[in-house]
Image (cartoon, rainbow, N blue to C red):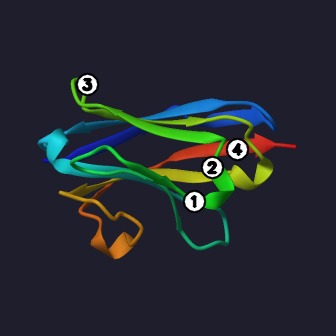
Amino acid sequence: QVQLAESGGGLVQSGGSLRLACAASGLTFVNYGLGWFRQAPGKEREFVAAINWGDDSTSLIDSVKGRFTISRDNVKSTMYLQMNSLKPEDSAVYYCVAKFFGRVLTDPKAINFWGKGTLVTVSS
C-alpha cells in the first residue's frame, strides 16, 4: 500500500522558515516524479513545486521562486520543501504528490498518489 506522509507544517511568523518532508513507502521511489500542491481555505488547489523523474529537474510557481527549494533523497525515500521568507499568503494545507515516471506534475488529475496534507500557517 502506497503511503505519502507529510510532516513539518506548523505556525510561523512572516519572514520565517519551515521545511516540509514527505516520506514515501510502498512504491519504488526512484520511479516517481514528486511534487507539492497547496490549498488555502476558500481557494482552488494549486501546484507549488515539482522535482521530476529521471533528471531531478525542478519547477516552481513564480510566487515561490527564490524562496522555496524542492529536493529529494532517494536513499531515504523522502522529498523536502524548504520554505524561506514565508508570507501570510503561503498559508495553506500542503500536499505531497507522486506521479509514476512523472515529468509534468502540474495537472492534479494526472497525479497517482496524494498525501493527507500538512497545515502551514504564516502569521503577519
C-alpha span from label 4 to label 2: 19 Å
Q: Secondary structure at mark 3?
A: loop
| Image marks 1 and 2: residues in contact by CB distance under 8 Å | yes
- Please identify, in this view, whether the residue under mark 2 or under mark 3 is nearer the observer: 2
The amino acid beneath tag 3 is Lys
Q: Is residue 21 above or below residue 51?
A: above
Q: Amino acid at mark 2?
A: Lys
Q: Give the CA separation, mark 4 to mark 3.
A: 27 Å
Q: Would you say 121 lies left or right of 115 here?
A: right
Which labelled disc corresponds to residue 121? Answer: 4
**Disc 2 versus disc 3: distance between alpha carbons?**
26 Å
Neighbours of disc 3 within 10 Å: few (<14), some (14-19), many (20+): few
- Quadrant into which the C terminus falls: top right
Report if the CB atoms under discs 2 and 3 are less than 8 Å apart. no
Q: Which residue carries the number 3 mark?
A: 76
Query: For mark 1, what is the residue?
Result: 61
State which mark lies toward you, 4 or 3. 3
Badge 1 local density, few (<14 within 10 Å), some, or many (20+)? few
Report the residue at 18% width, 57% height from top: 101
Q: Residues within 10 Å of mark 4 (few under 14, many from 20)?
A: many
Q: What's the CA distance linking mark 3 and mark 1?
A: 26 Å
Task: Answer with mark 2 or mark 3, whichever residue precedes in sequence.
Answer: 2
Helix, strand or loop at mark 2: loop
Residue sticking out furthest to the right: 124
Q: Which mark is residue 65?
A: 2
The label nearer to you, 3 versus 1, is 1
Circle nearer the N terminus (1, 4): 1
Q: Which amino acid, mark 4?
A: Thr
> Between disc 4 and disc 2, whose residue precedes?
2
Q: Position of residue 10 (x, y in %)?
A: 63, 35
Which quarter of the figure has residue 121?
top right
Tell me: residue 58, above or below residue 43: above
